[in-house]
Amino acid sequence: MEKYSLGTACAEPGTTAFGHVPVVNRPDGTMIKLPVIVVHGTQPGPTLVVGACCHGDEHEGTMSVIRLGQTLDPKKLKGTFIGVPVINVPAFHNMRRGNPYDLYILDMNRIFPGRPDGFLTERIAHVYFDQIISRADLVIDLHCGANILVLTEHVCYERPESLELAKAVGGTWDILWKGAPFGSGTTMGGCARYGIPAIGLEVGGAGGRFDHFEESIGKMVHGITNVMKHYGMLEGTPDVPEKYTVVDLLQMPCNYGGIVVPEPDFALRKRVKAGDKLMRIIDFFGRELEEIRAPFDAVVTGRRVYPVVHAGEWVVFLGRETEE
């Protein structure tokens, strides 16, 4: 094994290194840089890239990457772990989903692999793919419900070649969301152009304000560790569920602005039947404007946590089972 260099991070075999990959200068002359954590093993093995916070208000992933950088023992590792705790640095600084410094605020997870001559977010996305993702054998993209939603743990995959990676997360990650509803510009879509298996992990949200923040970090770290065991990067046997449920995911919007009131028995991971009442939208006087009902038999995978809602915004996520 030779030393591994990425940007300013340089790791000898059996060591962990920290550094940055430069992107472009700001108006004041300082540089936008991607922080990187390189845990370089002592024996050959896969290169796993784990990236977080391409949406600047999704912080469970950031903390999970940091936690892995602190706890992985490079002397017991085969291959290389590359963690990027924050991809969309300007969005993170502003605690917003997108980068406010773009002329048009872009969703980074819709424009991968970016453009070297595009807007600021496109240039950051390009450097992430061109200099970091291009080195990967496996990619895991970390997400959550951000400020306004909370999600139960589920694994997203778009292509058949990523199914093995999706199942390797194991543990309590037994809901697999299959499909590409957001087009080809997601991290997974960009990785497909490189021929790299890639998945996304979704868990938590609500701006980290609830007690489940630490629990969500633990679930992400455990799942990523399972992946590393499955692919021989770490010793040990990964734990896997008895079965997986593959779902099509529906993000249900409301048609009226108002206040969201969940039904008393509403809960994440609850199995619901077509027609079951899930939530109500009420006005300032308590009058019901709309009922949110399940359009099909499904499992609840997410919900809105902000009580105020505008017409067209997501209020419930439902997974319709397609196979087991």
Image (cartoon, grey):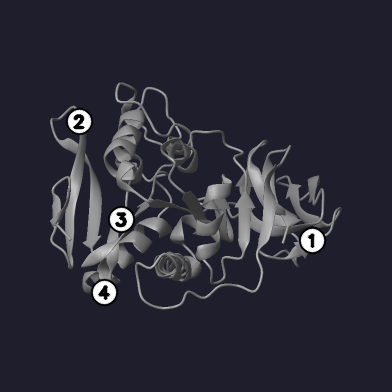
Return the disc, 3 or 4, that comes first in the chain's sequence: 4
- Where is residue 106 drawn, in percent x and y? 43, 30
Quarter of the rendering containing residue 234: bottom left
**Label 4 sits on residue:** 76
**Label 2 sits on residue:** 26
Return the disc, 2 or 4, that comes first in the chain's sequence: 2
For the point 23% across and 57% down, the residue is 38
The disc placed on residue 83 is 3
Return the disc, 3 or 2, that comes first in the chain's sequence: 2
Q: What residue type is disc 3 on?
A: Gly
Tell us which disc is closer to us: 2 or 1. 1
Q: What residue type is disc 2 on?
A: Arg
Instruction: Give the distance between the C-alpha atoms of the residues marked 3 and 4, in whole angstroms.
Output: 17 Å
Instruction: Give the distance between the C-alpha atoms of the residues marked 4 and 1, in whole angstroms.
Output: 45 Å
Return the disc, 1 or 3, that comes first in the chain's sequence: 3
Instruction: Give the distance between the C-alpha atoms of the residues marked 2 and 1, in whole angstroms.
Output: 50 Å
Q: What residue type is disc 1 on?
A: Val
Q: Secondary structure at mark 3?
A: strand
Q: What residue type is disc 4 on?
A: Lys
